[in-house]
Image (cartoon, helix red, strand yellow):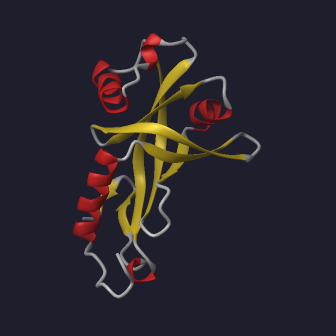
């Protein structure tokens, strides 16, 4: 999209967002530890039942931050097609994870963390706020979700 094109409607932005959640495989995951030290890493993900599912080891900073902080900001890498998703995090061991979510993750990524080391955990990020925009002319009406409720 170029700035000379008319801005997308919020409904179109939501459609584009949902398509992107289906096709992308990597998402940036921003967390912070109890001291407020930030951590930013890309992780594989799957969009399943209105939530983003991630998987990483509990022993690494991101895993600990997701479990302990219970909040995350997720983003895609393209700075001209911005998606920011703030969400609440729930942690599941490989044994506790709902099988449908783990299977959706495996089907999308080709990797089943349940077959690996027990230190892997799944994290369900339920969106609380979502912003979507391309270029400055789409900044107005960029909030597609607030307080966990779609605005469109």
Taking 139 as reference, is 36 left or right? right
In the figure, 109 relative to 143: above or below? above
Taking 95 as reference, is 101 left or right? left
At 41% from the left edge and 16% from the top edge, which residue is drawn? 96
Q: Name the quadrant containing residue 117.
A: top right
Most extreme residue toward the bottom is 4
Q: Which of these two is toward me, 5 or 66? A: 5
Taking 75 as reference, is 23 left or right? left
Q: Which of these two is toward me, 71 or 53? A: 53
At 38% from the left edge and 78% from the top edge, which residue is drawn? 138
At 36% from the left edge and 75% from the top edge, which residue is drawn? 141
Q: Name the quadrant containing residue 114.
A: top left
- In the rendering, at what x and y percent does residue 4 appear? 35, 88
**Can residue 94 be seen from the camera position used here?**
no
- In the rendering, at what x and y percent does residue 94 appear? 45, 16
In the figure, 92 relative to 152: above or below? above
- In the rendering, at what x and y percent does residue 40 appear? 63, 47
Q: Quadrant of the C terminus?
A: bottom left
In the figure, 128 relative to 68: above or below? below
**Can residue 149 be seen from the camera position used here?**
yes
How many numbered circles are shown? 0
Q: Which of these two is toward me, 15 or 128? A: 15
Q: Name the quadrant containing residue 70.
A: top right
- In the rendering, at what x and y percent does residue 75 appear? 49, 54
Q: Quadrant of the N terminus?
A: bottom left
């Amino acid at each position: 999209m170029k700035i000379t094109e008319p801005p997308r409607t919020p409904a179109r932005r939501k459609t584009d967002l949902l398509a992107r959640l289906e096709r992308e495989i990597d998402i940036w995951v921003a967390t912070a530890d109890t001291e407020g030290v930030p951590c930013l890493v890309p992780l594989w993900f799957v969009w399943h039942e209105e939530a983003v599912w991630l998987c990483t080891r509990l022993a690494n900073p991101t895993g600990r931050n997701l479990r302990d902080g219970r909040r995350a900001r997720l983003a895609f890498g393209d700075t001209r097609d911005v998606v920011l998703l703030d969400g609440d995090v729930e942690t599941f061991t490989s044994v506790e994870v709902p099988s449908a979510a783990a299977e959706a993750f495996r089907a999308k990524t080709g990797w089943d963390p349940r077959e690996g080391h027990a230190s892997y955990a799944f994290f369900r990020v339920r969106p609380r706020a979502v912003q979507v925009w391309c270029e400055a002319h789409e900044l107005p009406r960029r909030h597609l979700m607030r307080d966990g409720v779609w605005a469109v």
